[in-house]
Amino acid sequence: LNLSKALASGALHRESAMREALELCMAEAGLLVFREQGFPLPGDEQVRISSLFGAGEMHSTHVGHGKAENEDIFRLSNDKSEGIVGPGAEWHCDGSFEEEVFSHAGYHVVEVPERGSAGTSFSHLAVVHDLLDPKERRILQQMATVNSHSGVLHPMVFQHPTNQRLSVFLHLAMTGAVVHVEPSGKRTALNKEDMSSLFNRLNDLYNHSRSALHHKYEAGDLVMIDNWAVAHRAQDGSFSQADGLRVLHRTTVKGSYELAVQNLGLPKSLPEEKPPTWFPPEAVWVKEYVGFRWRPCEEKDMSGGRSLEQVQFQTPCFESSLHSSEHVSRSLWTDRFDRDEL
């Protein structure tokens, strides 16, 4: 299916059955890969295609780059003279700092490296939920994340508005706190050990062979995703220049629904610089661009010749040669509930 030709012919438009079917397929599968859409696909055309979905308008909050063809194009690259370098290395959903998380996103590589390929990994959030054990699901349903940049709260388990499947939500780079509400209404927040355990556990499930798809771009690919159905991340090596120049154009679409915390008695946001008075003294509270640092910085993070300071500006890692995520308990965050330590 050539989307530009379908638009030009009138077969594809906001009220068409074709658009509705594509959006339903995205909700179920998480993403659709459209081959041979033009190389490079003009930025204005990518915006036009993207705006067919969700609320029907773009929602662009990114940093601009001088070589972007359109203000709604987020231009990413492994060369700072060609695009923005560095963001997106952890699993996340775009627009997590908004109450109305972006509904859809589009990805098109306009410069494919000469050797290898510029890849993006995607993970189906409903499958991640299904991979949890019953105790983990029960606990997560009583939890919400606090975005480190905006203070907006989102539930850690939500029902997708289109496919109705229970899904997990966690931005692994911009979460500044995780709160829990007991059935009695008592509120608390996780400490460093609990959050490290939880983040490593969900990172494992995001990377699980049943939930993850590792896409390698071909010239002309346009990948459209349901941003509520899948999380994504840049694949290792995306910022290295060893294989040649990589440039990717991303578009994001305004959400039609609020990803709101329901039935937990929590506010929509905690925008204050200091934690609420009901946070325990040992609870994690981060109000910066990058949230809780849950893993050590690794050699792969330094690709592209970036310094540790540059990496830590965009990546939730800490400098340490003594700790490894492999040795972090994946069950500690649930064990503490069993012992009533929260």
Image (tube, rainbow, N blue to C red):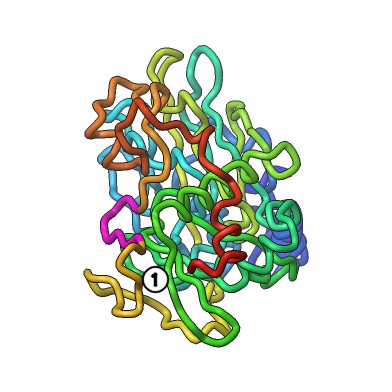
Q: Is residue 267 visible?
A: yes
Please identify the quarter of the rendering in which residue 245 is found: top left
* Above or below for 269 versus 325: below
Q: SS class of the residue under badge 1?
A: loop
* Residue at the disc numbered 1: 152
Q: Position of residue 308 (x, y in %)?
A: 26, 29
Q: Residues within 10 Å of mark 1 (few under 14, many from 20)?
A: many
Which residue is depicted at the point 53% across and 72% down? 259
Q: Which residues are magenta?
A: 284-291
Q: Nearer the viewer, residue 23 or 257?
A: 257
Quarter occupied by the N terminus: top right
The percent position of residue 19, horizontal first and vertical second, equals: 70, 62
Q: Nearer the viewer, residue 208 or 314?
A: 208
* In front of the other: 3 or 96: 96
The residue at 67%/71% (across/down) is: 159
Q: Amino acid at mark 1?
A: Val
Q: On the picture, is 315 further left or further right than 99?
A: left
Picture coordinates of residue 310, whole percent (x, y):
25, 34
Q: Residue at x 42, y 15 (%)?
A: 244
Q: Main secondary structure of the magenta part?
A: loop
Q: Is residue 328 above or below residue 265?
A: above
Q: Is residue 24 left or right of residue 190?
A: right
x, y percent for residue 204: 61, 41
